[in-house]
Amino acid sequence: MSARGVPEVVVDYDMCEANGVCEAIAPEVFELDDDEQLHIKAQPDSDTEQRVRQAVASCPKVALSLRE
C-alpha cells in the first residue's frame, strides 16, 4: 500500500494484451500508447481507487493487481 493509504496498481506486462478495458474505466490512471503498450500515468488516489478496482476486476487477461 502506498503512503496515501491507497493500494498501488501492478501490471504483469507478460500477461497484458492491451485490450484497453482498464483505460476505458480509469483513463486518469491507465494509458495505451500508439504501440499499444500500457502505461501507468499515475497511481490511484482516493478519487480513482474505486474505478481502478473495477479495472483490475475487469481485465480479461488478469494482468492487473493491487498491492495493498
Image (cartoon, grey):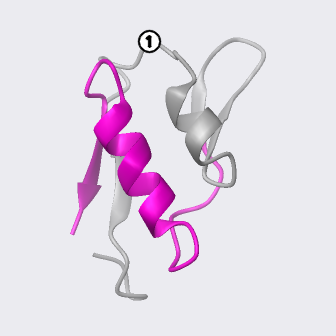
Q: In this view, does 17 lie above or below 63?
A: above
28 displayed left or right of 9: right
Q: Which residue lies furthest to the left in this view?
A: 68
Residue shown at the point (69%, 54%) measured from the top left = 28
Residue shown at the point (57%, 42%) measured from the top left = 25
Secondary structure found at label 1: loop
Residue 4 in which image quadrant: bottom left
Quadrant of the image containing the N terminus = bottom left
Magenta-span inclusion, residue 54 = yes
Residue 9 in which image quadrant: bottom left
Q: Which of the pair 26/42 is nearer the observer?
A: 26
Quadrant of the image containing the C terminus = bottom left
Q: Is residue 66 above or below residue 50?
A: above
47 displayed left or right of 65: right
Where residue 11 appears, as percent x and y from the top left, is 37, 38
Magenta-span inclusion, residue 9 = no
Is residue 46 at least partly visible in the picture? Answer: yes
Q: Is residue 33 above or below residue 42?
A: above
Q: What residue sits right under mark 1 in the picture?
A: 17
Where residue 7 appears, as percent x and y from the top left, is 32, 69
Residues shaded magenta: 40-68
Where residue 31 appears, as percent x and y from the top left, is 67, 36
Q: Which of the pair 8/62 is nearer the observer?
A: 62
Q: Which amino acid does label 1 sit on?
A: Glu
23 displayed left or right of 49: right
Residue shown at the point (34%, 43%) measured from the top left = 56
